[in-house]
Image (spheres, rainbow, N blue to C red):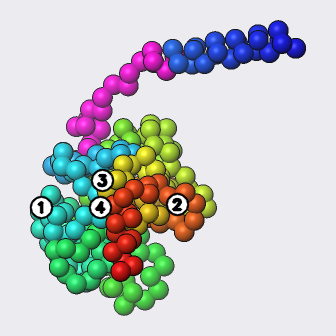
């Protein structure tokens, strides 16, 4: 038995070395030709599992609307308390703080290529929803996990190219990616169960992309992504 175990151990070691060699010597993917792929260069969004940038400037949910206006320019319309819209860009930011102060933290950001108002059963509902939506859609594409994403694309094509893992279970039209590798010690969120999520909504017929959504998510149980001193400090203040 000992000799068989020894042989199996050597085989396992050899396979691991082979896998490591193949990973290290895989041909590098050519860089994305942004212009050829139709990426919006005026409003360049690049998202990875650890970074979010707009025209090279880092941003993330949890930042205040005042801080985000320094990056994106001042919002063009306050649709409702807590709903800030850049109509000319097709961008919406949402805050649970409806005070309108610059210090209000933003919990959600949306890039819209199309908004399907199907299911709005009355004219009043449609009017209300339209007011909460950008008056123009985002043009061109963004970069998500090393792959371009935008209108005129099939979701399956994007999933084959991105290096992020999206899951649409149990919602067939919504694809989620939880950012567990983010450095939450430096994130402007303060509760230990919170983390960031990317969400992509595809069209009802499955042939197009409608929205890219960045949000603060929360889980009620399980190991939190971060339990550092900043969280303890925040929690202690809350409990005083």
- Ranked by sequence position, the earlier of labels 4 and 2 is 2
When the figure is inspected, residue 34 is found, relative to residue 104, above or below; the finding is above
Q: Name the spot of residue 113 as percent of width and height, x first.
A: 33, 59
Q: Distance between the residues labelled 2 and 1?
A: 34 Å
Find residue 110 and report its horizontal and vertical position in percent. 32, 63
Q: Name the residue under label 2.
A: 173
Secondary structure beneath label 2: loop
Query: Residue at label 3?
Result: 186
Q: Residues within 10 Å of mark 1 (few under 14, many from 20)?
A: few
Q: How many marks?
A: 4
Q: Which residue is situated farthest in the right direction here?
A: 1
The quarter holding residue 99 reads bottom left
Foreground residue among 208 and 54: 54
At mark 1, the secondary structure is: helix
- Which region of the structure is painted magenta? 22-40
C-alpha separation, residue under disc 1 versus residue under disc 3: 19 Å
Q: Residues within 10 Å of mark 2 (few under 14, many from 20)?
A: some
Q: Residue at x 33, y 25 (%)?
A: 30
Q: Which numbered tag is attached to residue 84? A: none
In the depicted view, which residue is nearer to us: 211 or 38? 211
User: Can residue 126 be seen here?
Assistant: yes
Q: Vertically, is 225 above or below 218?
A: above
Q: How crowded is mark 3: few (under 14 residues within 10 Å), some or many (20 or more)?
A: few
Q: In this rendering, which labeled residue sits more in front, label 2 or label 1?
A: 1
The quadrant of the rendering that contains the N terminus is top right
Q: Name the residue under label 4.
A: 188
- Mark 4 and mark 2: Cα distance apart in space: 30 Å
Tell which tag, 3 or 2, sits nearer the viewer.
3
**Mark whose residue sits in front, 4 or 2:** 4
């Amino acid at each position: 038995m000992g000799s068989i175990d020894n042989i199996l151990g050597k085989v396992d070691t050899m396979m691991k070395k082979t896998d490591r060699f193949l990973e290290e010597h895989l041909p590098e993917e050519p860089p994305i030709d942004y212009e050829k792929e139709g990426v919006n260069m005026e409003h360049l969004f690049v998202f990875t599992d650890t970074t979010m940038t707009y025209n090279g400037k880092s941003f993330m949910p949890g930042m205040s609307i005042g801080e985000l206006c320094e990056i994106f320019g001042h919002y063009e319309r306050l649709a409702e308390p807590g709903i800030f819209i850049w109509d000319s860009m097709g961008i919406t930011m949402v805050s649970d703080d409806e005070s309108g102060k610059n210090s209000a933290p933003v919990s959600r950001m949306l890039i819209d290529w199309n908004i399907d108002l199907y299911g709005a059963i009355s004219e009043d509902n449609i009017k209300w929803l339209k007011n909460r939506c950008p008056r123009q859609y985002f043009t061109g594409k963004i970069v998500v996990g090393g792959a371009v994403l935008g209108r005129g694309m099939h979701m399956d094509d994007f999933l084959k190219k991105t290096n992020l893992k999206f899951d649409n279970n149990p919602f067939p039209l919504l694809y989620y990616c939880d950012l567990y590798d983010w450095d939450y010690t430096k994130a402007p969120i303060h509760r230990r169960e919170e983390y960031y999520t990317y969400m992509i909504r595809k069209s009802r017929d499955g042939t197009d992309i409608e929205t890219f959504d960045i949000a603060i998510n929360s889980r009620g149980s399980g190991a939190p992504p971060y339990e550092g001193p900043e969280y303890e400090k925040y929690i202690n203040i809350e409990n005083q």
